[in-house]
Image (cartoon, helix red, strand yellow):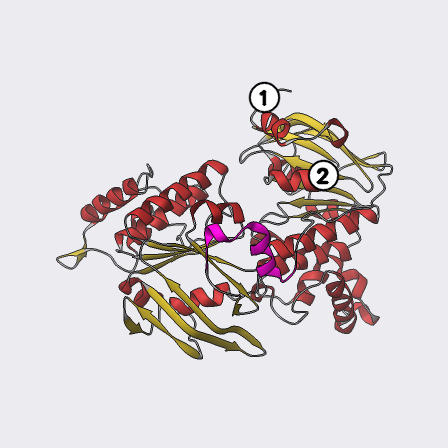
Amino acid sequence: MLEITGLTKQFPGVLALDHVDLTIHEGEIHILLGENGAGKSTLIKSIIGVVKPNEGSLIWKGEPVHTNSIREAYDLGIAVMYQELSNIQCLNVIENMFVGSEILKNGLIDWKEEYRQAKEYLTKVGSTVDPYTICEKLGMGQKQMVEIAKALQRKAKLIIMDEPTASLSRREIDGLLKLMMQLKAEGISILFITHKLDEAQKVGDVVTVLKDGKKVGQTLPIEQADEEQIIHMMVGRSLEEKYPERHAVIGDEVLRVEHLSGEKFRDISFSVHSGEILGVFGLIGAGRTETMRGLFGADPLSAGRIELNGKEVQIRNPREAIEHGVVLISENRKEEGLILIHDVVENVTLPTLDNFKGPLRLLRRDKRERKTLEYGEKMKLRPLHIHKNAMNFSGGNQQKIVIEKWVMADAHVYIFDEPTKGVDVGAKVEIYSIINKLAEQGAAIIMVSSEMQEILGMSDNVLVMYEGRQTGYVPRSEDMTQEKLMVLGTGGKI
């Protein structure tokens, strides 16, 4: 279907792709793996014409091609679905599916025919969404289905899926994987970029690994590539311990929350001690994120009491939370954790600007840069280019920038909401190490995660939520198991 030969792309100071070869066959699910910054995004952009390679060739169905735009790629039969979906939120499903390729009749848009085709292809992918629904009202899984229906309507024969399951619930993930197998059976090829090795092994036919812009070894049949081998290919080392050993000593109580309630959660009570990592587990819609936003002052509380170091405090907004030493590393780092068009210095020093004022209360840029470099080295930020805009870093390194910002603020309570979402296995271990280090230094850690293994691997104790209520508290001393957490996470009792 598609043969890529010797693809090379040089950016100023960075060799993003280094003579990469890749072949995708008809009706094949080809898994593409690699750490953040390995070159996966550049490879995708080169295929669809967003980036012009310095060297190499693309052969589509036996013919050499040069794509210069996404439109040209679509015309060939190549569609792409990014992790941050390209839906236009204020338009309805029909308008999104046909934007740029409207069906015309007598010079006017044929809305009747567009509705008919939208309904047909939505049904084909198993979606029951009303085509007249405005996209901003859809859930992430529904938006994914709209994107796939759009690709099929435009007769795509190769669909590139970039981290399509990162923001989906377990049920939505299972539905998407099932749909991928159905598309494969119909002869459609899929290039599937993911960090979740279990998903890759469920649906993949073959796997290719990129590292530092180069293809590592040969493309392997998925049954010949076990998890340990894939991880070794991705990061260049064995990850015998996914969850680094921690030596924190659990001390005095730092935070106590009693009967906290808000719009989507009610009557939540827990405490966290210095050196402790409290895991918060629950399925999508459990109210975990909303509870943490309420604690941080980002959303209003309707009831509840918050104590820090034994004293009651009022947290009515994020500024008050920060002043009390409570910080939130948000799940949505791109919109809530970073100013993407600002550089690393501007991002990490924003909450602590008063610390960098010199004579006449003017900001000392040189002092901000020195501090950013110092903490960037501690966070293992790669590359350590502090004048580079946040938008130009990989997902794992963007997360490190957010964490660096709050570590520099010298917080006492760190709330990590899905800290490794969309992050590769190597960067995950580094982020776990950072969290462990903070705990060892006496911080109180709350870690929200929907990944069962992450909760079990990192937590001292676990608070479980279901539909806005806490259903249980599981100490590690009581034989914390997947079964216990899942029972509580689905509203059951143990």
Residue 47 in percent (x, y) is at: 39, 67
- Give yes or no for residue 228 being in the magenta stretch: yes
- Left or right? Give the position of 304 relative to 275: left
C-alpha gap between disc 1 and disc 2: 21 Å
Residue at screen point 74% across, 27% down: 478
Main secondary structure of the magenta stretch: helix
Judged from this view, the residue extending furthest toward the front is: 224
Viewed as shown, does residue 301 lie left or right of 151?
right
Circle 2 SS class: loop
* Residue 91 visible from this viewpoint: no
- Residue at left offset 56%, top offset 50%: 227
Disc assigned to residue 459:
2
Check if residue 434 falls in the magenta segment.
Answer: no
Q: Residues within 10 Å of mark 2 (few under 14, many from 20)?
A: many
Q: Nearer the viewer, residue 89 or 154?
A: 154
* The N terminus, quarter of image: bottom left
Q: Is residue 23 left or right of residue 226?
A: left
Q: Which residues are magenta?
A: 220-237
Q: Is residue 347 left or right of residue 323?
A: left
Looking at numbered disc 1 in the image, what kind of residue is underneath it? Gly
Q: Which residue is mark 1?
A: 492
Q: Disc 2 residue type?
A: Ser
Give the total number of marks visible in the rendering: 2
Give residue 190's position: percent from left, percent from top.
37, 54
Residue most extreme to the left? 106
Q: Is residue 107 visible in this depiction of the protein?
A: yes
In the image as oriented, which residue stretches furthest toward the top?
493
Q: Is residue 206 above or below residue 313?
A: below
Residue 409 picture location, percent across and down: 77, 55
